[in-house]
Image (tube, rainbow, N blue to C red):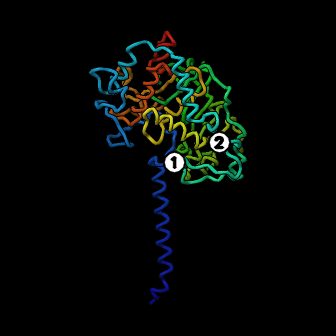
Amino acid sequence: MPSRRGSQPWVLAVWFIRLLFLVLVVNALWLWLGKDGSLLQHAFYTSTSKKTVGRQRISANKTSRLPIFNNCCRGQTDPLSVALQKMNGSQWRFNKTAIDIFRRDLLEISQFHDYFTATKKNSPLNSFMYYFEKNRKVRIPVSGPVWFRLPKELPFSKDDRFNTCAVVGNSGILKNSKCSSKIDSSDLVIRCNFAPVDGNYTEDVGRKTGLMTLNPSILIHTYKWLLMRRDQDRFLRDMGHYGNALVYTNPFHFREVTDIVIKADLLARHRHARQKVYFSHPTYLEGVTEFWRGRNVTERRLSTGLFLTSAAIALCSQVQLYGFWPFSTDRQGKNIPYHYYDKSSINSVVHNISEEFGHLLQLYSEGIVNITTHPCETSSNSSKSA
């Protein structure tokens, strides 16, 4: 009979393999469930289940914690009713003084013109950055392989100012909106997370793209870690729909996505893609989060909507939002899909994205940004909330 003592190394090896497999499974589930901490969440992410999703959810018949929802309209407590009454109450008017003050404070606190993207200038060779999600506890060495792929300067200088900008969300309210001409007539168009602009979608959302955000989780889930040639080809083909857009993504948000984002950049360079990939700098992410915290946004991770709106205000004289509507019906009570490019419906219980909309609605009421919520083909005045 074999000695038990002699079999112990094999037993230990088997248990070690099992433990390693368990760690890999847990890590995969961690990423799948959205614990990646990515700043660029899907625009207007809402739950299609009755279970709780995220840390905060607001029912259509419950009161929001935001003053804009609680106090603006007497007798109305649910976010949808408040939004409708607020937007129907008066014609929107652009307030240049308000946006100038807002932009001044935003630029100062976020350090947009110094740290919007990582560059050779703000991230010197052999220096250190810190992962955004780790509260400056985990350092990132700026070594040669990272530093040499950074651009010398930021993509936008302090003198760059676009007159009109369109920020395009992914809400189903864009479906059949026929907003393409208005969107594409903007000097700068900002989109998020590879939302489609080709085929039948073009007449509603246009094609022009100047800045496109890319959540690293898309590289993992949609493009399967870019492991196979077919997934690499699909990634490059999809990115090719956005012309000469700047692709803005987050390799330094947390350690687990650094390699896949750098791989995507390397692939784009190797295959001579027209689009240039830029990396967010953790200092800017901290700064813009601090700015919104001063406006009563308590979430550690900014939503896509607030992040893109911040970038647009920093870069543009006037900002128009499209596809920002976190409710299951439009302003006429007609059911709308979750995204303009899919058929799934929005559950009446929504994610904390309706809290985000409350902050955007506050900017709307102050004349800082306009929000398009009607089909553009029926709009007769660009100053009116469409």
Instruction: Work out whether 40 lies above or below 381.
Output: below
Residue 198 visible in the snapshot: no
- Element under disc 2: loop
User: 4 or 311: nearer the eye?
Assistant: 311
Mark 2, Cα crowd under 10 Å, few <14 / some 14-19 / many 20+, is many
Q: Is residue 135 above or below residue 358?
A: below
> Picture coordinates of residue 285 (x, y %)?
55, 40
Relative to 267, residue 322 above or below = above
From the top left corner, tell me how far across and down residue 267 is, in percent. 67, 45
Furthest toward the top, the residue is 380
- Residue 59 picture quarter: top left
Q: Position of residue 363 (x, y in %)?
A: 46, 24
Q: Which mark is residue 133?
A: 1
Give the residue displayed 37% in from the left and 26% down from the top.
68
Q: In 3D space, how far apart are the residues under numbered discs 1 and 2 (Cα atoms)?
A: 17 Å
The residue to which callout 2 is attached is: 118
In the structure shown, which secondary structural element does the residue marked by tag 1 occupy? helix
